[in-house]
Image (cartoon, helix red, strand yellow):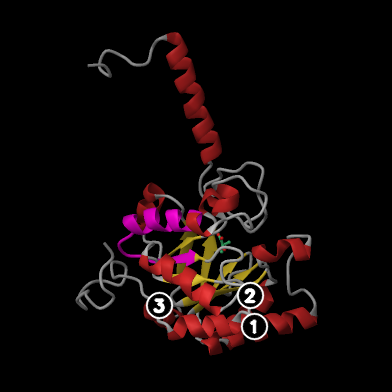
Amino acid sequence: MPQAPDSAPSSVPAAKRKVTTLRLTEMKRAGDKIAALTAYDFLTARLLDEAGVDVILVGDSAAMVFAGHDTTLPMKMDEMLYHVRVVTKAVKRALVVADMPFMTYHKGIDEALGNAGRLMQDGLAEAVKVEGAGDNILPIVRRLVEAGIPVMGHIGLRPQNILNYGTYKTRGTSQDEAEQIIAEAQALADAGAFSVVVEKVPAGLAERLTRAVPIPTIGIGAGAGCDGQILVTPDMLGLNTQFHPRFVRHYAHLAKEMTGAFSRYCEDVKAGSFPSRAESY
Ligand code: KIV
């Protein structure tokens, strides 16, 4: 079970202390970078936590990298809740943030409160993430925060808006759109969001935005100037050979490693060399 935010004695080093929303703000102020990754299952979440990842996002990217859809839009509330439950069961130190799936917070404040409440109470998430900062979203952010639900924003490229964009191209490349993205970050901070994901914008814009707002910015494809970085875990592990945008660094080549293991297993079974006597009862 996660520790209560203030239960760690001050002698506990920061690397071991439970990460809270307050801790992330302190990290921004101190210039300590925030390392975030996504998780959708128990074992991966446990490994991320043990490795010292500060924020674990149960992203609706699960719709793509876990369930094989083309976009994040098909992710349903009950599916998200399932992933959140298994991830929070594994995590002790990191802050676990649950994505609010498409159409689970757009129809009104009551619906948003109900769904965010489920992610917190049934899923044991410690915060939720919503995309956008328009006139429809900001009152929802305010109300969730008032209700005690920490909110992470998500601006720049918003995957839940992909059918309107029609492309995954970099956002904020025009002066107008760049100014709008900075205004969105400020509006989210004013509405009470504790942090904001900034996706696929020019590095200079993300850097400016990071200086402009008091809340930590977590970049993905947004250069090194953000307060933290996030990647989709199966992408950084090299699990998807068909997806390699330049902002993804491969920290492993698991597709190759796993295919090799599966092939060797098939060979051993077919040759009758698995299981051996020592692997039998
Ligand atoms: O769903 C997700 O994984 C995300 C990250 C790309 C930030 O929103």
Give the CA separation, mark 2 to mark 1: 8 Å
Check disc 3 and report its element: helix, strand or loop: helix
Q: Nearer the viewer, residue 116 or 267?
A: 116
Residue 257 picture location, percent across and down: 50, 34
In the picture of the structure, the residue carrying the numbered disc 1 is 184
Give the CA separation, mark 2 to mark 3: 20 Å
Q: Residue at x 51, y 45 (%)?
A: 252
Residue 156 picture location, percent across and down: 67, 72
Query: What's the magenta region?
Result: 79-98
Q: Quadrant of residue 187?
A: bottom right
- Furthest residue toward top: 271
Residue 61 vertical position relative to residue 212 in the rendered view, above or below: above
Q: How many marks?
A: 3
Residue 97 picture location, percent across and down: 45, 67
In the picture of the structure, the residue carrying the numbered disc 3 is 21
Kind of residue at badge 3: Thr
In the picture of the structure, the residue carrying the numbered disc 2 is 132
Main SS, magenta region, reads helix
Q: Nearer the viewer, residue 122 or 18?
A: 122
